[in-house]
Protein backbone atom coordinates (compact mmCIF):
# COMPACT_ATOMS: atom_id res chain seq x y z
CA UNK A 1 0.00 0.00 0.00
CA UNK A 2 1.67 3.25 -1.06
CA UNK A 3 1.92 6.12 1.39
CA UNK A 4 -1.01 8.47 1.52
CA UNK A 5 -0.41 11.67 -0.44
CA UNK A 6 0.13 14.72 1.76
CA UNK A 7 -1.90 17.89 1.67
CA UNK A 8 0.11 20.68 3.28
CA UNK A 9 -1.27 23.73 5.02
CA UNK A 10 1.27 26.49 5.55
CA UNK A 11 1.86 27.24 9.21
CA UNK A 12 4.47 29.94 8.54
CA UNK A 13 4.16 33.26 10.32
CA UNK A 14 2.50 35.20 7.46
CA UNK A 15 -0.14 32.52 6.92
CA UNK A 16 -0.54 32.22 10.67
CA UNK A 17 -1.39 35.92 10.88
CA UNK A 18 -3.97 35.52 8.14
CA UNK A 19 -5.86 32.95 10.19
CA UNK A 20 -4.54 29.51 9.41
CA UNK A 21 -5.87 28.24 12.70
CA UNK A 22 -9.39 29.02 11.54
CA UNK A 23 -8.73 27.33 8.19
CA UNK A 24 -7.34 24.10 9.68
CA UNK A 25 -10.56 22.77 11.27
CA UNK A 26 -12.48 23.64 8.12
CA UNK A 27 -10.06 21.65 5.96
CA UNK A 28 -10.36 18.71 8.36
CA UNK A 29 -14.15 18.91 8.08
CA UNK A 30 -14.03 19.17 4.29
CA UNK A 31 -11.80 16.10 4.01
CA UNK A 32 -14.23 14.22 6.23
CA UNK A 33 -17.28 15.38 4.25
CA UNK A 34 -15.67 14.20 1.04
CA UNK A 35 -14.58 10.83 2.42
CA UNK A 36 -10.91 11.70 2.04
CA UNK A 37 -9.74 11.69 5.65
CA UNK A 38 -8.36 8.16 5.29
CA UNK A 39 -6.89 8.76 1.85
CA UNK A 40 -5.04 12.05 2.25
CA UNK A 41 -2.69 13.08 5.03
CA UNK A 42 -3.21 16.67 6.18
CA UNK A 43 0.06 18.15 7.40
CA UNK A 44 1.27 21.51 8.58
CA UNK A 45 4.14 22.90 6.56
CA UNK A 46 6.76 25.60 6.85
CA UNK A 47 6.63 28.77 4.74
CA UNK A 48 6.03 27.77 1.12
CA UNK A 49 7.36 30.99 -0.40
CA UNK A 50 4.54 33.19 -1.68
CA UNK A 51 3.63 34.66 1.72
CA UNK A 52 2.01 37.69 0.11
CA UNK A 53 -0.45 35.30 -1.53
CA UNK A 54 -1.33 33.56 1.72
CA UNK A 55 -2.86 31.53 3.08
CA UNK A 56 -1.11 28.84 1.04
CA UNK A 57 -1.75 25.10 0.68
CA UNK A 58 0.22 22.59 -1.37
CA UNK A 59 -0.58 19.22 -2.86
CA UNK A 60 1.68 17.22 -5.17
CA UNK A 61 3.59 20.27 -6.37
CA UNK A 62 0.47 22.42 -6.87
CA UNK A 63 0.22 25.56 -4.78
CA UNK A 64 -3.17 26.89 -3.77
CA UNK A 65 -3.03 30.53 -2.74
CA UNK A 66 -5.20 33.34 -1.38
CA UNK A 67 -7.03 31.03 0.98
CA UNK A 68 -8.87 32.63 3.88
CA UNK A 69 -11.13 31.41 6.67
CA UNK A 70 -14.10 32.76 4.70
CA UNK A 71 -13.28 31.33 1.26
CA UNK A 72 -11.73 27.96 2.14
CA UNK A 73 -14.89 25.99 1.39
CA UNK A 74 -15.18 27.45 -2.11
CA UNK A 75 -11.46 27.17 -2.80
CA UNK A 76 -11.46 23.58 -1.58
CA UNK A 77 -14.40 22.55 -3.73
CA UNK A 78 -13.22 24.36 -6.88
CA UNK A 79 -9.46 23.90 -6.77
CA UNK A 80 -8.20 21.52 -4.13
CA UNK A 81 -10.81 18.75 -4.26
CA UNK A 82 -10.36 18.11 -8.01
CA UNK A 83 -6.60 17.75 -7.47
CA UNK A 84 -7.10 15.38 -4.54
CA UNK A 85 -9.63 13.28 -6.42
CA UNK A 86 -7.40 13.08 -9.49
CA UNK A 87 -4.65 11.62 -7.33
CA UNK A 88 -6.71 9.44 -5.04
CA UNK A 89 -8.99 8.04 -7.71
CA UNK A 90 -6.07 7.63 -10.09
S1 LIG B 1 4.17 31.95 5.63
FE1 LIG B 1 2.83 30.82 4.36
S2 LIG B 1 3.74 31.01 2.39
FE2 LIG B 1 5.12 32.06 3.71
Image (cartoon, rainbow, N blue to C red):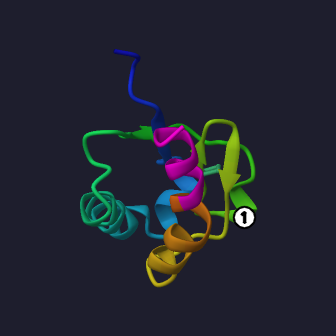
Examine the image and state in which quarter residue 33 appears: bottom left
The secondary structure that dominates the magenta segment is helix
Relative to the observer, which residue lies in front, 82 or 66?
82
Examine the image and state in which quarter residue 87 appears: top right
Q: Is residue 40 above or below residue 65?
A: above
Query: Percent from the top left, x then y, of residue 40?
Result: 37, 40
Q: Mark 1 highlights which residue?
A: 53
The CB of the residue at mark 1 lies under 8 Å from ligand 1: yes
Query: Percent from the top left, x then y, of residue 36?
Result: 32, 50
What residue sits 72% from the left and 64% below the top? 53
Relative to the observer, which residue lies in front, 36 or 76?
36
Query: Percent from the top left, x then y, of residue 83?
Result: 59, 52
Is residue 59 part of the magenta span, yes or no? no
What residue sits 57% from the left and 47% below the top? 86
Name the side, left or right, on which 21 lies relative to 87.
left
Q: Which residues are magenta?
A: 82-90
Name the side, left or right, on which 40 lies relative to 87.
left
What is the quadrant of the N terminus in the image? top left
What is the quadrant of the C terminus in the image? top right
SS at mark 1 in the image: helix
Examine the image and state in which quarter residue 25 appears: bottom left
What residue sits 75% from the left and 52% below the top? 50
Amino acid sequence: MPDKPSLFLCMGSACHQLGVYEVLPQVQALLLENGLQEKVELKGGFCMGPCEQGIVMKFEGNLFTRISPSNIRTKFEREILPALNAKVLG
